[in-house]
C-alpha cells in the first residue's frame, strides 16, 4: 500500500493537501487537509457591523464579493432593513457576473489542464482543428490560420525551453487521451478565456469600482447612485449600454466556447461519468431573487436537500440542523468535546497539534486540518453547482430541468451520470448558461427603473447606529459560485460581538467528523484508479471538479460559548 | 535548459508581434512609470534583448485576490506577461504542476537561477506557533519565503498582506502575521501595497526591472514613487466639489447622484497615497470613488487598523474644507515625496488615534510600524 501526497494542490484557491492510500491501482482511502489559517472572524470582533463586509470580503479574492453580499445580508437581517429593488438588482448583477466569470476561469484555467495535454497540441493539424471547432460552435475564431497562429505561439514557448506556467505539468501522462486537435482547440480557448475574463469583469468595475474586491456594498443598499440625467452618477444610461454589451458578450462566450467545449471533451472521457461520485447528499440554500430574501419560492436556484442520490424527494432546509465538528480539526472546544456545534453557539480555539515542519505525512488518525467538518443533521453534504442543479432538477424547476435534460439527451445518458467528476463539470457549465441568460434581464430592469425615475438604491433608516437595538443577531445566505454560504452576526452595543461564516469549501473539503464520516472530497476519491503514483493526475481531476477555495474554508468562530436565539430563515 | 540565443525579441517576432506594437507597449509602460520618452529606445532594446527572466509567485496567508488582480492585467495583456515577457514558472493558482512536481520547481529555480530570478510574494507570513499556520508541501511559509527571497535578485511584495501583514495582521493578529520585509529581513524588496495591488503598477515595475536591472525610485516604505507618491485627494475627480464645499451627506441623496465629495461619508482619500484615480482598475474602467463609495486607503500602511472605522469621517483637521489648506497638504506631500523625504509628521497630525484606540496590534519582534510612527 502506497501513500500518495499532493501538496500543494495547485490550480485552486488556497492551500490544500491531499493524502491518499493506493492499493491495487486504486485509492482506498483519502484525507483532505487545509494547511493555512488566518482567523478573520477573530479580527472582526469589536468592529462596526456596517463595515463588516469590507473585511469579510477579504476571506476570498477569487470568489470575491460573495462574502460581502452574505455579510451585508446578515447585518440587514439583524437590523431588519429592507433594501430597495435597485440594490437587489445590482447585487444580483454583481453576484451573477461573478458566477459566470468564475466558472469560466475555473473550467479553462484551473481545471482544463487536467484533461488537456498542452504539449500534444503541437501535433495537431490546424485545418482539422478548424473543422472540428466549426462543427461544434458558431464561434468566429475558428479558421485554420487562427489555429496555426495559436500553435506557433505554443511552439515558440516550448522551443524556448522556458515553459513558464506549463513547466511542471504531467505532459504525456497516459490518462491524457484527447486527440491532438481537441488539445489545440482547448489551448486556443484557454487563451481566449484569459482575455475574455478580464474584459467581462469590467462590469464589477462599473458597479463596484474594481475587481477583485469591488467596493460599493452598503448595509441598506448599494453606493451605486442612479440618475438618468447626471453623468457623474454611477448608473447612467451610458453605463447601462456598456453593461448590456458586457452581459450579451458573456452569454455569447458561454454559448460559443464554454458549453461546446464541455460537450466536446466530456464524451471523450466517459469513464469519469462513473468516477468521483462521493457522498450523494446535496445541500443548496438557494438564491437570486428580487423578492424577500427569506422566501425560497422566488429563487432562480431553489433551496433544498437531496439525500442519497434520491432525486424523487427534496427535503426542506432546517438551519438548526447545521453543526461543525472539530474531532479531526486543529481546534478545540472549551468544554473539551469535539462534537458538532451549531454555528450560532460555535466557538473555536485554534490549537495546532500536527507534526512539526518540515514533515512528510500528517497523523490522519488524529487532527489533520485547519478546516472544520460541517454536518447537516449529522450527515456530510456536498454543496456547489452540482448540488444546485440536482436540487433544482429534483424540485422540478423548469429552466434547470430543461437544461439538464437537453444535455443528458445529447450525451444519451441517464441522470445518474450527474453524480460524478464530469457531472460537476457539466453542472457548472449549465448553471453558467442559466445565469448568463438572466443577466441581461436584470440590466433591463435597472434600465427601466432608471428611465422611469425610480432611482432609490439605499434605505437610510438604520444607517445611524443610534437607531439600532442594543443587541441583534442575523444571518445572511448566498449561493456563491462554489456553493451554499452562510454568515452569522451578533451585534451588541453597536459593534460586532460574534461573527461566523460557514463556507462552501468547508462543506466539501472538510475532514472526518467524530463518527469518522468522510468529507465530500475524501469520499469522492474512493475507488479512483491512479496510473502513476508519482504523477497523480487522477486525484487532481476529481478534487478540481469541486473547484476548491481553501481560504474561504478555513475560518474561526470566536464565541462566548453561550446560546442565543438562532436567527430566522424562511 | 535554456537555448542561449532565445530572447524575448525572437519570441515576440515568432508570434507575430511587430516592432510597432512592441514600441507601443513599452511607451505605455513608460507612461505608467512617469518616465520621459527618451527612455523608450532603451526599454524597447531591453525587452527585445533580454532572455526571459524567471519569475516565481509565492502565495502564503492570502485570499488570492492579488493573483486574480494580476490576471486582470490588460496592458500588457496577462498572457503576454506570463508567456512572453517572463518565464512564470511557479504560481500555485495557475501553474500546471502540483505536489512534488511543483515543489521541485522552487528548488531548481533557487539553485540554478540563484541571484537572477524575481520572486513575487502574495499574502502575509505567520510567525506564531512556529509558523504552522501556513504550510505548503510540509514546509512553513517562512521557510519557503526565506529560501526563495534570499536567493532572488529582487522580491516584489504585492498587496497589503505581503506589504505589512494586511488584514491578517489586524488586531488581534491571531497568527503573528508579518509582511515579507519584516519576516525575511535584509532582502531587496519592493512593496506594491493595495488591497489588491494594481496590476498596472506591478507590470510597470517588472518592465522597469527588465529594462534597467534595478528597481524604480522608492519611498520610505519601499514603494515605487510613481505609484505611491501622490495623495488620492489631489488626483480625485470629485476634488472640485470638496473645494466648493459640496458633500454627499446621505447615501443616495442628490449630492451622491451628482458625484459630490464623499469626505463626510468617511472617505480616506485626503490621507491616502496611491495612483488609483489615474490608472484606475480593470482596463481603466473605474475606481471605488467613481462607484460612489469612499476610499478606504487600502494602499496605506496598516490601513485595516489605522484607517477604520471606514465610515467615520476623518477627525477634524484645522483648515480642512478650506481650499488653500487642503491644497497645501497635497502640495506638501507631493513635494516631500518627490524629494524622497518622509512625511510622517504631517499626516500624524491628521490621524493621531489608531483603531481600536485601546488595543493596538502587538508590535512585531523587530521594528514593526506602530501607530503614530508611520503614515
Image (tube, rainbow, N blue to C red):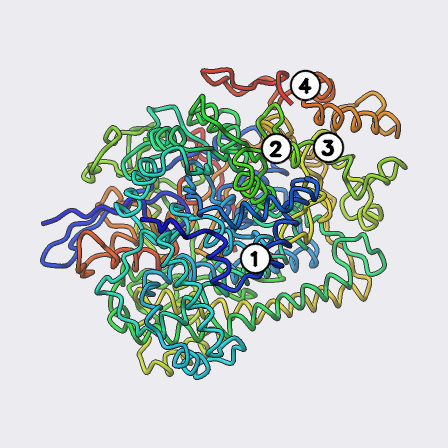
| Spatial CA span between label 3 and label 4 | 14 Å
| Spatial CA span between label 2 and label 1 | 25 Å
Label 1: few (<14), some or many (≥20) within 10 Å?
many
Chain letter for mark 2, please.
Answer: B
Label 2: few (<14), some or many (≥20) within 10 Å?
many
Look at discs 2 and 1 and give the one toward the viewer: 2
Q: Is residue B307 in view from this perspective?
A: yes
Chain letter for mark 4, please.
Answer: B
Residue A78 drawn at (x, y percent) = 59, 42
Question: Is disc 1 placed on a helix, strand or loop?
Answer: helix
Mark 2 — residue?
B224
Label 3: few (<14), some or many (≥20) within 10 Å?
many
| Spatial CA span between label 1 and label 3 | 28 Å
Mark with earlier residue (3, 4): 3
Q: Are marks 4 and 1 in contact (CB under 8 Å)?
A: no
Mark 4 — residue?
B344
Q: Is residue A369 left or right of residue A455?
A: left
Q: Are marks 1 and 3 in contact (CB under 8 Å)?
A: no
Q: Is residue B42 left or right of residue A542?
A: right
- Asked if both marks, 3 and 4, belong to the same chain, the answer given is yes
Question: Is disc 2 placed on a helix, strand or loop?
Answer: loop
Mark with earlier residue (2, 3): 2
Q: Is residue A316 in view from this perspective?
A: no
Residue B71 drawn at (x, y percent) = 52, 52
Question: Is disc 3 placed on a helix, strand or loop?
Answer: loop
Residue B340 drawn at (x, y percent) = 67, 23
Mark with earlier residue (2, 4): 2
Residue nearest the viewer, comparing A239 with B4: B4
Mark 1 — residue?
A198
Mark 3 — residue?
B231
Amino acid at each position: 500500500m502506497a501513500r500518495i501526497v499532493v501538496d500543494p494542490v495547485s490550480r485552486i484557491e488556497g492551500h490544500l493537501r491531499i493524502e491518499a492510500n493506493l492499493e491495487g491501482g486504486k485509492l482506498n482511502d483519502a484525507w483532505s487537509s487545509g494547511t493555512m489559517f488566518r482567523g478573520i472572524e477573530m479580527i472582526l470582533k469589536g468592529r462596526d457591523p456596517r463595515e463588516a463586509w469590507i473585511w469579510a470580503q477579504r476571506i476570498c479574492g477569487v470568489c470575491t464579493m460573495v462574502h460581502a453580499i452574505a455579510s451585508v445580508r446578515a447585518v440587514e437581517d439583524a437590523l431588519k432593513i429592507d433594501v430597495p429593488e435597485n440594490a437587489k438588482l445590482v447585487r444580483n448583477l454583481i453576484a451573477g457576473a461573478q458566477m459566470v466569470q468564475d466558472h469560466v476561469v475555473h473550467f479553462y484555467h484551473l481545471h482544463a489542464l487536467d484533461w488537456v495535454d498542452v504539449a500534444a497540441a503541437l501535433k495537431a493539424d490546424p485545418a482539422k482543428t478548424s473543422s472540428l471547432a466549426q462543427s461544434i460552435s458558431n464561434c468566429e475564431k475558428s479558421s485554420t490560420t487562427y489555429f496555426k497562429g495559436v500553435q506557433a505561439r505554443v511552439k515558440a514557448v516550448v522551443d524556448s525551453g522556458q515553459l513558464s506556467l506549463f513547466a511542471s505539468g504531467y505532459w504525456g501522462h497516459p490518462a491524457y487521451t484527447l486527440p491532438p486537435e481537441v488539445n489545440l482547440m482547448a489551448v486556443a480557448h484557454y487563451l481566449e478565456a484569459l482575455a475574455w475574463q478580464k474584459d467581462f469583469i469590467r462590469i464589477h468595475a462599473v458597479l463596484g469600482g474594481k475587481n477583485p474586491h469591488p467596493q460599493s456594498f452598503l448595509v441598506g443598499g448599494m453606493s451605486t447612485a442612479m440618475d438618468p440625467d447626471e453623468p457623474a452618477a454611477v448608473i447612467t444610461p451610458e453605463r447601462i449600454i456598456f453593461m448590456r454589451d458586457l452581459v450579451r458578450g458573456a452569454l455569447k462566450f458561454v454559448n460559443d466556447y464554454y458549453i461546446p467545449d464541455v460537450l466536446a471533451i466530456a464524451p471523450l472521457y466517459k469513464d469519469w461519468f462513473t468516477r468521483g461520485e462521493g457522498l450523494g447528499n446535496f445541500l443548496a440554500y438557494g438564491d437570486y431573487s428580487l423578492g424577500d430574501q427569506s422566501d425560497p419560492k422566488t429563487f432562480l436556484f431553489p433551496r433544498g436537500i437531496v439525500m442519497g442520490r434520491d432525486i424523487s424527494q427534496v427535503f426542506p432546509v432546517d438551519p438548526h440542523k447545521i453543526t461543525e465538528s472539530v474531532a479531526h480539526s486543529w481546534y478545540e472546544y472549551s468544554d473539551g468535546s469535539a462534537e458538532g456545534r451549531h454555528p450560532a453557539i460555535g466557538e473555536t480555539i485554534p490549537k495546532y497539534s500536527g507534526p512539526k515542519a518540515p514533515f512528510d505525512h500528517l497523523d490522519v488518525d488524529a487532527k489533520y486540518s485547519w478546516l472544520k467538518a460541517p454536518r447537516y443533521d449529522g450527515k456530510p453534504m456536498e454543496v456547489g453547482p452540482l448540488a444546485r442543479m440536482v436540487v433544482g432538477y429534483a424540485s422540478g424547476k423548469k429552466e434547470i430541468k430543461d437544461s439538464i435534460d437537453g444535455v443528458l439527451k445529447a450525451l444519451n445518458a441517464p441522470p445518474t451520470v450527474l453524480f460524478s467528476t464530469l457531472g460537476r463539470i457539466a453542472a457548472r457549465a449549465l448553471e453558467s448558461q442559466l445565469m448568463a441568460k438572466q443577466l441581461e434581464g436584470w440590466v433591463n430592469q435597472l434600465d427601466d427603473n432608471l428611465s422611469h425615475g425610480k432611482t432609490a438604491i439605499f434605505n437610510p433608516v438604520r444607517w445611524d447606529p443610534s437607531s439600532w437595538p442594543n443587541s441583534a443577531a442575523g444571518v445572511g445566505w448566498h449561493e456563491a459560485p462554489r456553493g451554499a454560504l452562510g454568515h452569522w452576526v451578533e451585534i451588541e452595543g453597536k459593534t460586532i460581538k460574534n461573527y461566523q461564516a460557514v463556507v462552501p469549501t468547508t462543506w466539501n473539503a472538510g475532514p472526518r467528523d467524530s463518527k469518522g464520516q468522510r468529507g465530500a472530497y475524501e469520499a469522492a476519491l474512493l475507488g479512483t484508479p491512479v496510473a502513476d503514483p508519482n504523477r497523480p493526475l487522477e486525484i487532481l481531476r476529481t478534487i478540481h471538479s469541486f473547484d476548491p477555495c481553501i481560504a474561504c474554508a478555513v475560518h474561526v468562530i470566536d464565541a462566548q460559548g453561550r446560546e442565543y436565539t438562532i436567527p430566522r430563515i424562511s | 535548459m535554456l537555448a542561449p540565443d532565445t530572447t524575448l525579441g525572437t519570441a515576440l517576432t515568432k508570434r507575430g508581434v511587430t516592432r510597432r506594437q512592441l514600441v507601443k507597449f513599452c511607451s505605455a509602460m513608460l507612461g505608467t512609470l512617469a518616465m520621459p520618452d527618451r527612455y523608450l529606445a532603451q526599454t524597447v532594446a531591453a525587452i527585445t534583448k533580454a532572455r526571459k527572466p524567471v519569475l516565481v509567485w509565492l502565495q502564503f496567508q492570502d485570499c488570492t485576490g492579488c493573483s486574480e488582480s494580476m490576471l486582470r492585467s490588460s496592458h500588457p495583456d496577462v498572457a503576454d506577461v506570463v508567456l512572453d515577457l517572463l518565464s512564470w514558472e511557479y504560481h500555485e493558482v495557475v501553474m500546471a504542476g502540483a505536489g512534488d512536481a511543483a515543489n521541485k520547481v522552487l528548488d531548481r529555480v533557487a539553485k540554478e537561477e540563484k541571484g537572477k530570478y524575481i520572486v513575487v510574494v502574495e499574502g502575509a507570513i505567520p510567525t506564531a506557533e512556529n509558523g504552522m499556520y501556513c504550510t505548503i508541501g510540509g514546509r512553513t511559509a517562512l521557510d519557503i519565503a526565506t529560501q526563495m527571497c534570499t536567493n532572488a535578485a529582487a522580491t516584489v511584495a504585492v498587496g497589503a498582506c505581503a506589504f505589512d501583514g494586511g488584514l491578517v495582521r489586524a488586531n488581534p493578529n491571531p497568527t503573528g502575521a508579518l509582511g515579507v520585509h519584516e519576516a525575511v529581513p535584509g532582502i531587496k524588496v519592493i512593496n506594491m501595497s493595495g488591497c489588491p495591488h494594481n496590476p498596472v503598477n506591478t507590470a510597470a515595475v517588472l518592465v522597469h526591472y527588465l529594462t534597467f536591472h534595478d528597481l524604480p525610485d522608492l519611498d520610505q516604505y519601499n514603494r515605487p514613487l510613481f505609484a505611491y507618491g501622490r495623495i488620492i485627494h489631489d488626483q480625485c475627480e470629485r476634488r472640485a466639489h470638496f473645494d466648493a464645499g459640496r458633500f454627499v451627506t446621505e447615501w443616495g441623496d442628490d449630492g451622491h447622484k451628482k458625484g459630490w465629495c464623499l469626505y463626510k461619508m468617511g472617505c480616506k482619500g485626503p490621507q491616502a497615497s496611491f495612483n488609483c484615480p489615474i490608472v484606475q482598475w480593470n482596463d481603466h474602467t473605474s475606481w471605488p470613488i467613481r462607484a460612489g463609495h469612499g476610499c478606504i486607503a487600502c494602499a496605506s500602511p496598516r490601513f485595516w487598523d489605522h484607517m477604520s472605522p471606514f465610515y467615520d469621517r476623518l477627525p477634524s483637521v484645522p483648515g480642512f474644507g478650506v481650499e488653500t489648506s487642503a491644497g497645501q497638504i497635497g502640495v506638501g506631500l507631493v513635494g516631500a515625496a518627490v524629494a524622497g523625504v518622509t512625511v510622517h509628521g504631517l499626516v500624524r497630525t491628521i490621524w493621531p488615534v489608531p483603531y481600536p484606540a485601546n488595543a493596538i496590534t502587538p508590535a512585531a519582534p523587530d521594528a514593526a510600524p506602530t501607530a503614530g510612527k508611520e503614515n
